Image (cartoon, rainbow, N blue to C red):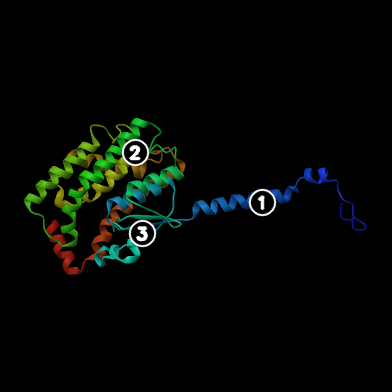
Amino acid sequence: ETAPTPPGRTLLPTRQAEQTPLPHKASGTRLRASRVLERFETKMPYTLYNLYGSPPCATVRMLAKHIGVDLELKDVDTFKKEQFTPEYLKLNPFHRIPTFSDDGFIIYESTAICYYLLRKHAPDSELYPNCNRARARIDQALATITSTIQPHYFKFMKPLFYELKKPTSEDLKEFEENVIKGFEQVLGDGNYVLGDKLSLADLSLVAHLTLVVELPLLEAQTSQKLKSYYERLKTELRLNRTALNTPKADTKCWETFNFLLKDLNRTTKSYYSDNCKRLLQKHLS
């Protein structure tokens, strides 16, 4: 039984009504709205709990710039021990930096964050090529840096920056043996970690080399091989707009080292009194 048709109106047969398309204008409006929403969603920034001067944080920020991902930075003041607050420990129970949030989905450890961003936004990126052997080499380099070299790296840097403690000759010798030679092994004999192509491993290596090469204190310990690699990549990433073969990334390449060097300046200016800065400068001269 069907409802009566109101006067003056014609009821379309059911099959005809089902086949009647939506007006073109309405469907176009919906499509445009969908595209606007999609653009809005991809532009929504992620949150990175960041420490300026930290190579792992710099690695994540470098990658984000290269693949065109916006990050909202929330600086963690380690001098105030903000990484040990209950609020931060809820995000990262290991009180390490960086920590990353994608609308409440929390990731810590810089390598895991980088993999997440690559898989979500740049699955075909040459920074992590779709080749098992290439990925194995990248993974090996990242694991070596974070698990083998980094503990020695921070053991040396922490007293220097947090305590203004001048390193002894034994400290410098240990740094050269465990860090400098370690970085040389990671780099190998090629122009890049993979030999002939820039990869995620290079971003991590360069981020760690910034403090090493830019500090006059370590000039004698730093090999010419690492200095040349660092300076060459600095030039390439600033000037070579096709280094990554990714249009979205090309416009960002030149910024990479600008903000890394700002890290060094900002660390000194933000955390030390004038007296401490003079003392630090004396140590580094």
**Residue 37 appears at what percent x and percent y?**
58, 53
What's the residue type where badge 1 is placed? Arg
Q: Label 3: which residue?
A: 91
What's the residue type where badge 3 is placed? Leu
Q: Label 1: which residue?
A: 30
**In the current view of this chain or complex, which residue is farthest to the front?**
1
Residue for point 59% across, 52% down: 36
Compared across the picture, whether 205 is left or right of 103 comes to: left
What's the residue type where badge 2 is placed? Ser
**Residue 284 appears at what percent x and percent y?**
14, 56
**Do we see residue 250 in this rendering?**
no
Circles 3 and 2: CB atoms closer than 8 Å: no
Mark 2 secondary-structure assignment: loop
Q: CA distance from mark 1 to mark 3?
A: 38 Å
Ranked by sequence position, the earlier of labels 3 and 2 is 3
Residue for point 40% across, 41% down: 241
Circles 1 and 2: CB atoms closer than 8 Å: no
Badge 3: how crowded within 10 Å, few (<14), some, or many (20+)? many
Mark 1 secondary-structure assignment: helix
Q: Foreground mark, 3 or 2?
A: 3
Q: Is residue 126 depicted above or below 79 in this figure?
A: above
Label annotation for residue 199: 2
Q: CA distance from mark 1 to mark 2?
A: 40 Å
